[in-house]
Amino acid sequence: MSRLEREKRTIRKMLEIYCWKKHGVQKGELCPECRKLLRYAYERLEVCPFGEDKPTCKRCPVHCYTPEMRSRIKEVMRFSGPRLFLYSPLSWLVHELREKFLD
């Protein structure tokens, strides 16, 4: 699986956790607002100038999200990041290892 595909899968899992806990949707589903944020994140990943060499968003020198969307995605990541360990330990481990050692 490519790095961008893995990024997409991770952000989707984070949004699913966030939406389930904060918006009360069924586990694995997304409300319209979170679907919009996911589409936006996917669009940004598709046009990332770094392509497969993309660092994690936290370490990226280019901030491609609008300020509003960046604030929203940071909120999702802050909330879901620690919980990802419980709901998707492998995704959490890969994300943490990349952030600490590969970027």
Image: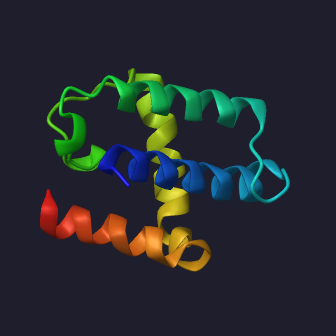
Image quarter of residue 18: bottom right
Image quarter of residue 64: top left
Q: Classify residue 23 as left or right of residue 36.
A: right
Q: Position of residue 85 (x, y in %)?
A: 51, 76
Height in image: 86 above or below 16? below
Q: Quadrant of the C terminus?
A: bottom left
Q: Classify residue 77 as left or right of residue 49.
A: right
Task: Name which residue lies at 78% across and 47% down.
Answer: 23
Q: Classify residue 39 as left or right of residue 55.
A: right
Task: Name which residue lies at 47% across and 32% down.
Answer: 42
Task: Name which residue lies at 19% across and 68% down.
Answer: 100
Q: Position of residue 90 (x, y in %)?
A: 46, 75
Q: Position of residue 52 (x, y in %)?
A: 22, 42
Coloration mode = rainbow
Height in image: 58 above or below 93? above
Q: Quadrant of the N terminus?
A: bottom left
Task: Name which residue lies at 56% across and 71% down.
Answer: 83
Image quarter of residue 39: top right
Number of callouts in the render? 0
Seen from the viewer's position, the closer of residues 45 and 63 is 45
